[in-house]
Image (tube, rainbow, N blue to C red):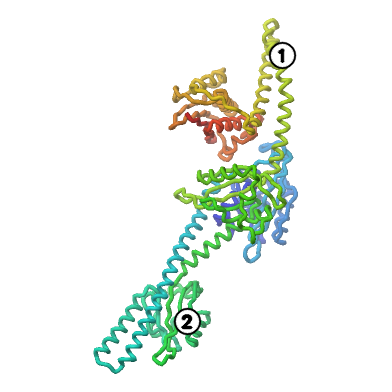
Amino acid sequence: MTPSSEQLFQSVFNYATLPMLVVNADDSELIIIAHNKQHKIISNTLDRDMTGGKISEVFSALSDAKDLALFIDTLKLSRLNKEVILLPYFKFTLGDAVTDNSDQNGWRVEIIPVLNLANEVDYLLSIWHSISNDNHIEILPVTKTQLGEELAATNEQIEAGNEQLENAAEELDTISDELVQTQEELNRLSQELEEKVSHHSEGSPHRKTEIENQKDRLKSFLMQAPAGICVLDGPEFVFELVNPSFQELFPGRSLIGKTFVAALPEIKGQLMWDILQEVYATGETFQGSEMLIPLANEETGNAEERYFNFIYQARFDSQGQIDGILLFVYEVTDMVLVRLEVEENEQRFRLLLNAIPQIAWTNTVEGEINFYNEQWFRYTGIDTEGNQAIGLQDMIHPEDLKNHSERFKGILESENSGYYEARLKDENGDYKWYLIRMQPIKDDDEHVLLWIGTATDINDLKILQQQKDDFISIAIHELKTPVASLKASMQLLDRMKHNSSEKMQSLIGLAGRSVDKVSGLIDNLLDPDQLAEGGILLKKKSFNLFNLVESCCQHIFGDDHHRTVITGEKGLLVNADQERIDQVLVNMLTNAIKYAPESKEILIHLEKIAETVKVSVTDKGPGISAEKIPYLFDRYYRAEDSKKPGLGLGLYISSEIISKHEGKIGADSEVGVGSTFWFILPL
């Protein structure tokens, strides 16, 4: 069975944040079974599906012939030796359409053979690790679509199966009780009947009638019992009595008057037949549970695997000799198949979670973690046998514990996916940074059934980030003094420029604007550090938001190339930091001009929603692809591949400012239609 037919595989596979590719393990040509979204991004194949294609053909347009040959040979070697192999270097040759830096397409490919229960290679999983020289590691968040749509169906099946299994178990317990009660009642009636027969064998017609009535009561009881009951007579086990419930188990078969073997020939040679003979020989009652008995289907003639719970009890004559068998039986095939299916799904689920390179776990809706994958035990050094009680919270750095508890609980209460950063202790007692993500699995009614969590190692990224921030901080402080001096000089020149030539005045004006731009860039670099450290203090006051929007537009749209249309509530007063909200508006408006230059009309709308106000800035530009929207407000992220100037900090700073106002910020976009950037502030 190929992984593409397994919803559970697809769920975990697409949930992984590293690029992954899966190929078949047949001896024939290597065929691509699946490739996740991250792999489509790095191979620039978001617009097409490589599934079903041959590696040799699909990759011929993506890579150098030597790299491709080495990749194929490594796949075959991993399949042959059933071992993990690391291909040290592979490069995509995608041209300038993707990047000007070929080093950004360098990858270390880890090839993992996935074995089935027979220890044979089912398929080959390749995980692609970036070796980019730009010291930038992009951690892509998982969207609800990736996991929710693909994994929910399978987990619903597992949850439904568990529920069905629980119901079946309850029903089975009830039936078992009924079987025991039926057996006890039958024994009591039989004993009463035997006593009356022995005491009144030569009695009056009235007494004989009473005995016959007792026999009828016994037979009526057997016929109405909810479990299948039959009486087998003599050592040949001839069907002497069969109640309707027993007959329903074997539709189309004639049982009365036939021997057990003649009526059910499949039984001979099976364990059930041997046990039947042993009970007849010893008189000891036997109770079997979920015994597998292959029986032929009378309509198709094919053998079907069926499961039964049953009781064999010896029947004794008046001299105490065994003269037959009482058989109580109840079919549990459906219940057993449900349980086996649930167990198989859970086994696959755990196998796939163990295959991904991240630490992973599952937890209940109450937050109780009920499964960790192997990477967790390998990283923490916890003994899987003796220390199951040690959990995620015990491995969190003390300084991060409060944030972890609050964020973990908050995500559970929100019933939406979320992520945060925390340091986890390894087996040596050292701490490393991890990005912790949690994704809910919901049913059709949007009820959370299960949570899946992952922890992705971002320690190297954090170190690089800290080095970058340290460098930027030093550079900012070193630049601010000379730039301030230069700005003062330019202001002095600006006041004196009227005494100079027209060309000199133009140059002074141009230089002044350049100094202002450099000063703005320095402030933008400084803001993220202050925001991260909580250093920006909001200076809130009440002001008219509509008037602020108008003022921003007059300042930015001073030419005839673009036109703004402002609509909505004009009298809304907000209590906020006017300067910071102005900064957010300016960023959104300048982005609309920069990235949608053909959009001559920019729409701004103010809308009161309950006790909040929503401000939307809409352009009619080229739009932004859906997979990029979740990252627009990340630090240093830039959606465009063009050479447009910018540091990728504007939207990040805007999101932090709105967050400090306890508001929300977001974007909606459709390629070819346009984009809307918005923020919401409390009134």
Which amino acid type is shown beneath numbered disc 2?
Answer: Thr
Q: Position of residue 159 (x, y in %)?
A: 49, 57
Q: Position of residue 395 (x, y in %)?
A: 64, 50
Q: Residue extending furthest top?
A: 499
Rendered position, 216 above or below 645: below
Q: Secondary structure at mark 1?
A: helix
**Observer-nearest residue: 182 or 222?**
182
Rendered position, 342 above or below 597: below
- Quadrant location of the N terminus? bottom right
Q: Which residue is located at x 66 percent, y 60 percent?
A: 28
Q: Is residue 674 visible?
A: no
Rendered position, 292 above or below 550: below
**Observer-nearest residue: 222 or 153?**
222
Which image quadrant for residue 62? top right
Decide: few, some or many residues near mark 2? Use Cα within 10 Å; few <14, some 14-19, many ≥20. some
Measured in 3D between alpha carbons, the distance from the residue under mark 1 to the one under mark 2, in whole angstroms, is 107 Å
Dot in front, 1 or 2: 2
Q: Residue extending furthest front?
A: 398
Left or right of 202 on screen, residue 178:
right
Which image quadrant for residue 641? top right
Q: Position of residue 617 (x, y in %)?
A: 52, 28
Which amino acid type is shown beneath numbered disc 1?
Answer: Ser
Mark drawn on residue 184? none
Q: Is residue 437 visible?
A: yes
Q: Position of residue 575 (x, y in %)?
A: 50, 25
Q: Which residue is located at x 65 percent, y 23 percent?
A: 520
Rendered position, 206 above or below 646: below
Of callouts 1 and 2, the N-terminal one:
2
Q: Which residue is located at x 44 percent, y 69 percent?
A: 173
Circle 1 residue: 489
Circle 2 residue: 285
